Image (cartoon, grey):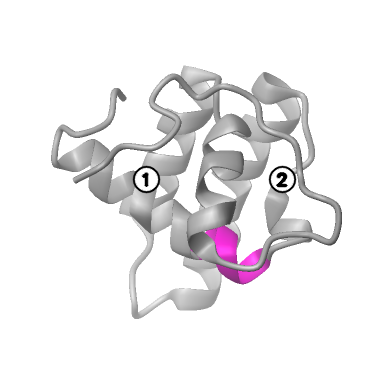
């Protein structure tokens, strides 16, 4: 597995936006350079339950947004790229739990 943006360096958004998840993912990782924010995202994903999907989404995004507003001091990419962000949340989670990405 190739690990992109392994050091979580900030990336700029291209003019015209992103055209694929693969092009968005390095940017997404740069928006998560703060370790506390990454941990809040992983906690948010772990806490999601199918039975309480609506509550889980609010709770999950609550953890993630706290990480962005307080620790990263940036605006979550979810507001501009909701589908890509959700996919990348799970991609980050998979890389962390498999030990391929530093937590």
Left or right relative to 47: residue 25: right
Query: Residue 38, percent across and down?
Result: 46, 31
* Residue 61 or residue 90, whichever sits in front: 90
* Structural crowding at the residue carrying mark 2, measured as other residues with C-alpha within 10 Å and reported as few (<14), some (14–19) or many (≥20): many
Q: Give the range drawn in magenta.
A: 82-86
Query: Residue 49, percent across and down?
Result: 33, 69
Left or right relative to 43: residue 32: right
Residue at the image position 27 percent from the left and 31 percent from the top: 101
Residue at the image position 39 percent from the left and 37 percent from the top: 4
Q: In which quarter of the image is residue 34?
A: top right
Magenta stretch: includes residue 41: no
* Structural crowding at the residue carrying mark 1, measured as other residues with C-alpha within 10 Å and reported as few (<14), some (14–19) or many (≥20): many
Up/down of 51 relative to 97, above or below:
below
In terms of secondary structure, what is the magenta stretch mainly? helix
* Residue 51 or residue 71, whichever sits in front: 71
- Quadrant containing the C terminus is top left
Classify mark 2: helix, strand or loop: loop
Query: Residue 92, percent across and down?
Result: 37, 45
Left or right relative to 64: residue 72: right
Residue 76, disc: 2
Residue at the image position 56 percent from the left and 54 percent from the top: 23
Residue highlighted by disc 1: 92
Query: Residue 91, percent across and down?
Result: 35, 54
How many numbered discs? 2
């Amino acid at each position: 597995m190739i690990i992109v943006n392994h050091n979580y360096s900030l990336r700029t958004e291209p003019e015209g936006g992103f055209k694929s998840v693969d092009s968005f993912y390095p940017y997404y990782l740069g928006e998560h350079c703060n370790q506390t924010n990454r941990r809040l995202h992983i906690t948010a994903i772990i806490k999601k339950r199918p039975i309480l999907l609506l509550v889980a989404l609010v709770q999950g995004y609550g953890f993630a947004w706290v990480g962005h507003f307080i620790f990263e001091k940036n605006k979550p990419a979810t507001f501009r790229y909701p589908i890509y962000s959700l996919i990348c949340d799970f991609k980050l989670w998979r890389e962390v739990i498999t030990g391929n990405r530093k937590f």
